[in-house]
Image: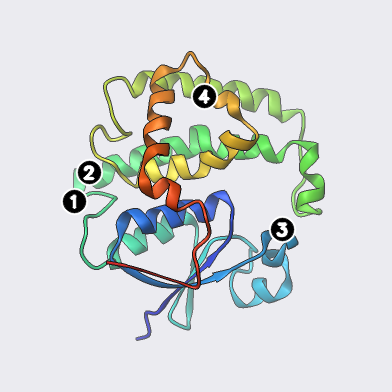
Amino acid sequence: MDTTLTLYDAPAPNPYVVRLFILERGGLDIDVNSIDIMKLENRRLEYRTKVNPRGELPALRIGNDFTLTEITAICEYLDEVATGGKSLFGETALERAETRMWLRRMDLEIAQPLIAWFRNDPATIDFYKGNRIPCPKARVTQKVMINQFLNLLDDELEGKTYLCGDRFSAADIHFYGLMKQMVEQVAPWVLSPGRLNVEAYWKRMGEREKSKAAVAPFDSRVTLA
């Protein structure tokens, strides 16, 4: 069975999550195809026919017959097929459950609402070119709810280095990866000066070597021991 891996990559938050995971995990050999999202290449018929009918990125082609989408599914698959290294989901049943708990919390409570808050800005209409319909009235409620959960996260990070305590995990990669570009470009209010633990966590994540290296899309191939 052909298990050659091909990643469809782009300079956007979701692909950044997978690039960061690949760099932190290691033990992977992957071909890479870059997709021009500014020209909506991912929404064109060729990409939707040959790669992902939903027109989303990233996507992971496995051999010639199967394409895996959704960043968590892609990261879990890569975690299992990586040669050597240490699992970023966990080495025990409890560690894996804890990782998925925090990944789910951060995705549902903060990351996805922030993405929705951004997409509901009427200024995004020209960028999405009819592929999304903004709802500006929803932004006030979304911003309040995001802030509520950030306040809770600040309490939950007390005395912790990462979401799973001292253990760096896929949950940190997912949360930081989805939020990084949003925080830097459109939502600096996420890092409120009053949320000291969230600020410190964000600084630790940003200072990781792989967090910096993953910013640029991959070249045509990435091979990591």
Q: How many marks?
A: 4
Left or right position of 21 against 95 = right
> From the viewer's perspective, is the residue at label 2 or at label 4 nearer?
4
Q: Which residue, given by chain and number where applicable, does mark 4 sit on? A: 191
Amino acid on which disc 4 is placed: Leu
Residue 149 in percent (x, y) is at: 48, 24
Residue 196 at x, y percent in the picture: 41, 17
- Crowding around mark 4 (Cα neighbors within 10 Å: few <14, some 14 to 19, many 20+) is some
The residue nearer to you, when weighing 31 against 145, is 31
Compare marks 3 and 2 and give the one earlier in the sequence: 3
Circle 4 SS class: helix
Q: Which of pointers 2 and 4 lies earlier in the amino acid sequence?
A: 2
Q: Which residue is located at x 28 percent, y 51 percent?
A: 88
Residue designated by label 3: 38
Task: Say what amino acid the circle numbered 3 marks.
Answer: Met
The Cα atoms of the two marked residues, 3 and 4, are separated by: 28 Å
Name the spot of residue 57 as percent of width and height, x first. 58, 60
Residue at the disc numbered 1: 91
Residue that appears at 33% across and 34% down:
163
